[in-house]
Image (cartoon, helix red, strand yellow):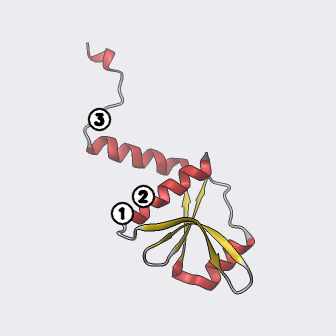
Amino acid sequence: AKGELGENLSLVKSIARGDLPLTKQARTRLSKGYTRADHITRNDTSVEAKFGPWAELSTRQRQAVEELGDKYRVDFWRPEDVGKITGGVAGGLGLSFQDDWAER
């Protein structure tokens, strides 16, 4: 569940940057082997999403960071990020999560 949440947040981030995701769970070739990116964008950037304070990159993911540079983006997401995003969206829409009963 955490992995899927991080992957979805990164999809939204790519779209917000105008770099549309083209494929999900795709192999990214490296000099020795490959890594599986969560998605690859129109600008040919492989994106890996990590969620939680203890999330770490695998050996191949660290290799991708070194070899691919800005063509390999790692998004580290924390639970606080979800709160900021949902709070910002809700506030922008004028939504309130307070108990309506208190206003009666």
**Distance in Å between CA atoms under marks 2 and 3:** 21 Å
Q: At 56% across and 83% down in the image, what residue appears?
A: 69
Position of the N terminus, as image quadrant, is top right
Q: At 31% across and 32% down in the image, what residue appears?
A: 96
Q: Judging from the image, what secondary structure is the residue with disc 3 in?
A: loop
User: Of the residues shown, which amino acid type is indicated by label 2?
Assistant: Val
Position of the C terminus, as image quadrant, is top left
Q: Where residue 47 appears, x then y in whole percent?
A: 54, 69
Tell me the mark number nearer the camera, choosing from 3 and 1: 1
Marked residue nearer the N-terminal end (2 or 3): 2
Tell whether label 3 touches label 2 (CB within 8 Å): no
The disc at residue 16 is 1
Looking at the picture, does residue 35 appear above or below residue 104? below
User: Of the residues shown, which amino acid type is indicated by label 3?
Assistant: Leu
**Residue that label 2 marks:** 12
Q: Residues within 10 Å of mark 2 (few under 14, many from 20)?
A: some
Tell whether label 1 touches label 3 (CB within 8 Å): no
Q: At 54% across and 57% down in the image, what residue appears?
A: 7
Q: Report the front residue among 19 and 83.
A: 19
Marked residue nearer the N-terminal end (3 or 1): 1
Tell whether label 2 touches label 1 (CB within 8 Å): yes
Q: Judging from the image, what secondary structure is the residue with disc 1 in?
A: helix
**Residue that label 3 marks:** 95
**Distance in Å between CA atoms under marks 3 and 1:** 22 Å
The answer to which image quadrant residue 55 occupies is bottom right
Q: Report the front residue among 76 and 32.
A: 32
Q: Judging from the image, what secondary structure is the residue with disc 2 in?
A: helix
